[in-house]
Image (tube, coloured by chain):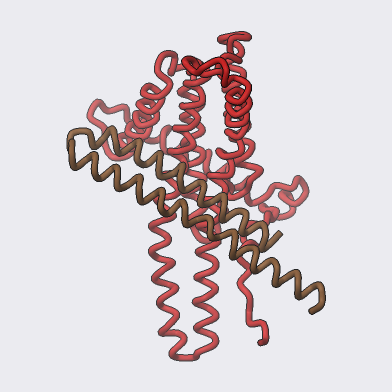
Chain colours: A brown, B red
Amino acid sequence: MNPATAAILAKDIGAGLAAIGVAGAGVGIGQIFAALVNSVARNPASRDQVFGLGILGFALTEAVALYALLISFLILFG
Amino acid sequence: MAAGPSIDALGQFRLATSLGPIGAAVNFTNANLMMLLTAALVLALFGYGMHARAIVPARTQAAAEMGYEFVARLCEDIIGEGWKSFFPFVFTLFFFILFGNLVGLFPYFFAFTSHIAVTAALAVIVFALSIIVGLVKHKLRFFTYFMPAGAPKLLAPILVPIEILTFLSRPVSLSIRLFANIVAGHVLWEVFAGFMLIVAAALGVIGIAAGVIPLAINVVLVGFELLVAGLQAYVFAVLTCLYLHDAVHLH
């Protein structure tokens, strides 16, 4: 296998491995919205307050998923 | 296995000079053009919207007032005392990023927030502002921010470096969050559009019918990208307010 082909193979494998990191963010986002639904179910009056926090938490957790995706892209295209 | 047609996912973010020969002379890029368009749209929304000055607002004025109140409530809730000094900055930031993201959703337009240079510049401005505000308001007591009150003094050698590292990672996370969200959305669009063309070209009539599936996914992604555009602007503004609250109140 010549070095050029090996490099492409390594890039593809590396990008695939790096993308596994988004799984953790998926679990985290599910937990945030589970907590959100739970708290609104217990106390429907708190919906407006809790919703803002929930969306902020979702965006911060999704950022971690995107860091993993960014590294995957950097490996694949960099 | 022969290599099939590949999808150029990242070529869409390349800068090109706009406005013909005048633009090429001064290197006025498509990103610059989109930024000017964004500024013009924000000014149009608020200038034209508030022009009527009705006590009971009509549609555009109501939209402008709702936007204003949204950011004002955000600043007041999060920054607390002294929020009025920072409100113009957070307002500008929020609407620049929001309209920038939205303008990038249209075909043949360009999402300037998809460049790390732009988002890093915004994040560095926020970071520098929070440090300057903290130093001007609290002088050298600003550095007590890194030693949380109530923590045992024995842990200080471990705690303070971690706190400093967390503080220094703020501009990094702020810029990468916005940039990666927008890039990921646009890359997904390009990839599914590429699928659509490849499937349609390769399989003939069945391909054209099968190409409807990536098209449907793209339509759903438009909705998701609208959500992301608004959400990322909101998160950037909220985190800016949080960092300013920390700078002003030191906890």
Instruction: Give the mark count.
Output: 0
Q: Position of residue B113 (x, y in %)?
A: 57, 46
| Residue A71 image-quadrant placement | bottom right
- Who is closer to the viewer here, A42 or B119? A42
Position of B240 with respect to B120 (left or right) is left
Q: Residue at x 63, y 26 (%)?
A: B161
Query: Which residue sits furthest front?
Result: B154
Q: Residue at x 57, y 47 (%)?
A: B179
User: Against B86, is A30 above or below?
Assistant: below
- Who is closer to the viewer here, A78 or A5? A5
Position of B212 with respect to B189 (left or right) is left
Q: Quadrant of the N terminus of chain B?
A: bottom right
Q: Residue at x 57, y 21 (%)?
A: B155
| Residue A56 image-quadrant placement | top left
- Who is closer to the viewer here, B250 or B231? B250
Q: Position of residue B107 (x, y in %)?
A: 51, 61
Q: Position of residue A66 (x, y in %)?
A: 53, 51
Q: Residue at x 67, y 86 (%)?
A: B2
User: Against A15, is B42 above or below?
Assistant: above
Q: Position of residue B101 (x, y in %)?
A: 50, 47
Query: Which residue sits furthest right?
Result: A2
